[in-house]
Amino acid sequence: MAALIVSWLKAAFLEVQEYLLMVGKTARALVTPPFYMRDIIDQFEAVGVGSLTVVLLTGMFTGMVLALQSGITLDQFGARSMVGRLVSASMVKELGPVLTGLMVAGRVGSGIAAELGSMMVTEQIAALRALGTDPIRKLVLPRILAGVLMVPLLTVVSTGVGMVGAWIVTITELKVASSVYWNSVVVGLFIQDVWMGLIKPFFIGFAIASIGCHVGLRTQGGTQGVGRATTNAVVASSVAVIAVDFLVTKLLISLMY
């Protein structure tokens, strides 16, 4: 039993070490040439535009169900007009960044791991190295940049669409005037909430893309290994989204409030 625990700890430390080494090499590649701009633009499109549909649908239905549920609850206190305040605070600070991160983790994290894992088991990455191309610059850096810069934009879109979805439910189901809803939204938001909702997605996007790249580059065992890597990337990215959300929220609360 002790030997099993020691073996597990060694494997865990090795994974952390390899992950940190990859992040360090990526940081170095960010500030030194050559840069593969075509690959970076392609990843921006794959991560940003490719994830837009699922993010729009998630934001819309989240806002709608949030308005519906909170309207029923607030009715008990005669505060149905406060639905906008509750929806805006919830979507901007928490639900927008977290749900967007989870959707991107499921779509992009798995895709990155599967793509890089397939390249590993078919020795395409070894061929890149043989040709003098750094896989970190060519494959990892574009994906991490896309994650860091696209997830915040997707979060803004998701939050905005969520508020529109809540507005539709509020005026149709709850029979609250449109002006009352939007005034409540504005009153319920503070500048600290907006900053919190904008800052967290940068860290979430970095976690998703870097974990996907790390798992993909560590893939072994043929096609079965690619399947395991894809599953591991989705699970690890999803857990990382929740953990990063908590840690960054705690840090920002201590700095802003």
Image (spheres, rainbow, N blue to C red):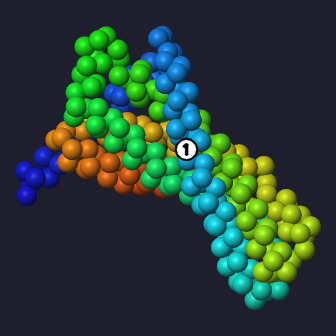
Look at label 1 and name its amino acid: Gly
- Specify whether 210 is left or right of 214: right
Tell me if residue 181 comes above or below residue 31 in the rendering.
below
Image spot of residue 136 (x, y percent): 38, 23
Splitting the image into 4 quarters, where does residue 223 fall?
top left
Q: Is residue 196 visible?
A: no
* Residue labelled with disc 1: 50
Image spot of residue 130 (x, y percent): 25, 13
- Specify whether 119 is left or right of 240: left
| Of 232 and 10, the residue lying toward us | 232
Name the residue: 85% across, 80% down: 175
Name the residue: 26% across, 44% down: 226
| Of 22 and 55, the residue lying toward us | 55
Q: Is residue 31 visible?
A: yes
- Quarter of the rendering occupied by the N terminus: bottom left
Name the residue: 47% across, 11% down: 34
Tell me if residue 55 comes above or below residue 16 in the rendering.
below
Name the residue: 29% across, 32% down: 119
Tell me if residue 140 comes above or below residue 7 in the rendering.
above
Residue farthest to the bottom, as pictured: 76
Label 1 residue SS: loop
Image spot of residue 123 (x, y percent): 22, 27
Characterize the local packing of mark 1: few (<14), some (14-19) or many (20 or more) Cα atoms within 10 angstroms.
some
- Specify whether 184 is left or right of 153: right
Splitting the image into 4 quarters, where does residue 85 fall?
bottom right
Splitting the image into 4 quarters, where does residue 83 fall?
bottom right
- Specify whether 85 is left or right of 240: right
| Of 225 and 147, the residue lying toward us | 225
**How many numbered circles does the render carry?**
1
Image spot of residue 74 (x, y percent): 75, 82
